[in-house]
Image: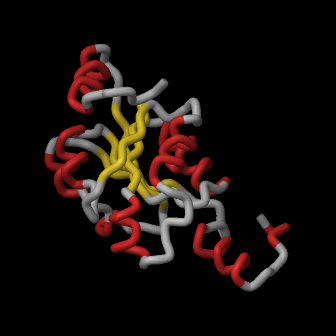
């Protein structure tokens, strides 16, 4: 089982000892959909993939009291089940900057819905020569759009 009592510093040290690159991304990953999976699979191409997910508490602060729909342990379980993700961590802060500073990823990756300047940790990662990458998204797919279709009882066949 992934992440059972795992120390983030020991993981990154292990990858670096063996010459591996570390790719890092983060998000809520509520209502996991093919857009998420596509972005995560592309992120994995850059190195060992570490994913950080917002805790339920931080999601409520960012997205409101009706989110998340899927609780953090369940979201973590689903992401841990994807074979191309190496580690999943939950963070309680509003941003993952503390994790980014511990991990010091070679690649900091987000979907192209974020501009490079908006990506939390960009300056830190670039300060030591790391790269910040925008992954193209599958157009028209988002958790918010899925939720709106469900609220409006609209046909979900578009997804």
Q: How is the image coloured?
A: secondary structure
Q: Image point 27% across, 55% down: which residue? A: 96
State the count of labels.
0
Front one among 125 and 62: 62
Asked if residue 8 lies left or right of residue 137, the reply is: left
Instruction: List x then y, in percent, for residue 43.
Output: 48, 43
Q: Image point 14% across, 48% down: which residue? A: 127
The image shows residue 100, relative to residue 92, as above or below, that is: above
Instruction: List x then y, in percent, for residue 69.
Output: 55, 65
The quarter of the image holding the C terminus is bottom right
Q: Quadrant of residue 54?
A: bottom left
Front one among 64 and 37: 64
Q: Quadrant of residue 13?
A: top left
Q: Image point 36% across, 48% down: which residue? A: 90
Asked if residue 139 lies left or right of residue 62, the reply is: right
Q: In which quarter of the image is residue 64?
A: bottom left
Residue positioned most to the top: 18
Instruction: List x then y, in percent, for residue 136.
Output: 55, 58
The image shows residue 137, relative to residue 47, as above or below, that is: below
Q: Image point 41% across, 40% down: which residue? A: 88
The image shows residue 13, relative to residue 73, as above or below, that is: above
Front one among 107 and 67: 67
Residue positioned most to the bottom: 152
Instruction: List x then y, in percent, for residue 110.
Output: 42, 56
């Amino acid at each position: 089982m992934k992440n059972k009592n795992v120390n983030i510093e020991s993981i990154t040290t292990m990858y670096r000892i063996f010459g591996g690159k570390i790719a890092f991304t983060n998000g809520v990953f509520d209502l996991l959909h093919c857009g998420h999976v596509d972005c995560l699979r592309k992120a994995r191409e850059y190195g060992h993939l570490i994913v950080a997910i917002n805790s339920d508490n931080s999601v409520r602060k960012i997205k409101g009291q009706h989110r998340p729909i899927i609780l953090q342990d369940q979201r973590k379980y689903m992401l841990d089940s994807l074979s191309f993700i190496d580690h999943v961590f939950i963070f309680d802060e509003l941003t993952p900057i503390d994790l980014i500073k511990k991990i010091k990823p070679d690649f900091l990756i987000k979907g192209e819905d974020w501009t490079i300047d908006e990506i939390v940790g960009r300056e830190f990662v670039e300060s030591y020569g790391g790269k910040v990458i925008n992954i193209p998204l599958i157009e028209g797919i988002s958790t918010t759009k899925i939720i709106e279709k469900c609220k409006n009882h609209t046909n979900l066949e578009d997804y």
